[in-house]
Amino acid sequence: MGLLLVLRPPQPGPKSLRRATRAQRRERHRADAEEWRTAQQRGWLLDVAVEELLPLVNSAGGGRLPILGRLDPWSDTVLDHRDLPRLEADVDRLEAAAGDDAQRELVAALRRLLMSWRAEPDLLLHCYGD
């Protein structure tokens, strides 16, 4: 199980592909795949294993963390740029609680993602859980 964090431009309202033709559905999936590739190349995408994130969040304060402590890794969430300072504070607490190299790498990856977000304030942070 994982949590996919990706910076994306604001999305239009969801359009149902229920009545779409097969060609329209294929085109939509092709566009989504291209968006993910571009996000990954730009450093806008981070795939985090829940088994790695949750113990670190718990050791850093769990539910007392304003963003990460309330993030449900099994559902989807969208954060806007106003959430960035609180999320950076959460990552600071994760860094202080990191006990091994794997946890420190996770914190560094989160910091890189947040630095990319700071450089692109019009993007939203989508958190996709499974």
Image (spheres, rainbow, N blue to C red):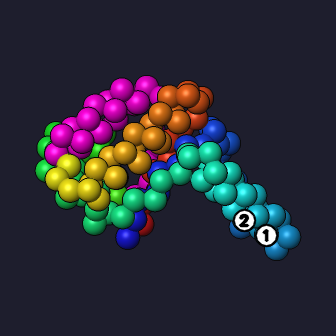
Query: In terms of secondary structure, where does tag 1 sit?
Result: helix
Decide: is 113 above or below 26.
above
Asked if residue 91 lies left or right of residue 122, the reply is: left
Query: Residue 63 placed where, x, y %?
Result: 18, 45
Decide: is 44 above or below 17.
above
- Residue topped by disc 1: 26
Asked if residue 52 lies left or right of residue 112, the reply is: left
Q: How many numbered marks are there?
A: 2
In whole angstroms, how far apart are the C-alphas of marks 2 and 1?
A: 5 Å
Residue at image location 36% in from the left, 26% down from the top: 85
Magenta stretch holds residue 3 = no
Quadrant the C terminus occupies: bottom left
Residue at image location 53% in from the left, 51% down from the top: 45
Query: Is label 2 in contact with label 1 (beta carbons under 8 Å)?
Result: yes
Quadrant the N terminus occupies: bottom left
Residue at image location 43% in from the left, 26% down from the top: 82
Residue at image location 51% in from the left, 34% down from the top: 117
Please rate how many residues cluster around mark 2, counting C-alpha atoms within 10 Å: few if below 14, some from 14 to 19, many from 20.
Answer: few
Amino acid type shown at disc 1: Arg
Q: Is residue 32 visible?
A: no
Query: Which numbered dot is residue 48?
Result: none
- Residue topped by disc 2: 29
- Residue lying at the far front in this picture: please name it: 101
Query: Residue 106 placed where, x, y %?
Result: 34, 52
Magenta segment: 74-97
Query: Residue 96 placed where, x, y %?
Result: 18, 40
Q: Is residue 2 visible?
A: yes
Magenta stretch prevailing secondary structure: helix
Asked if residue 119 lies left or right of residue 18, the reply is: left
Quick one: 33 or 78, which is closer to the camera? 33
Decide: is 42 above or below 119.
below
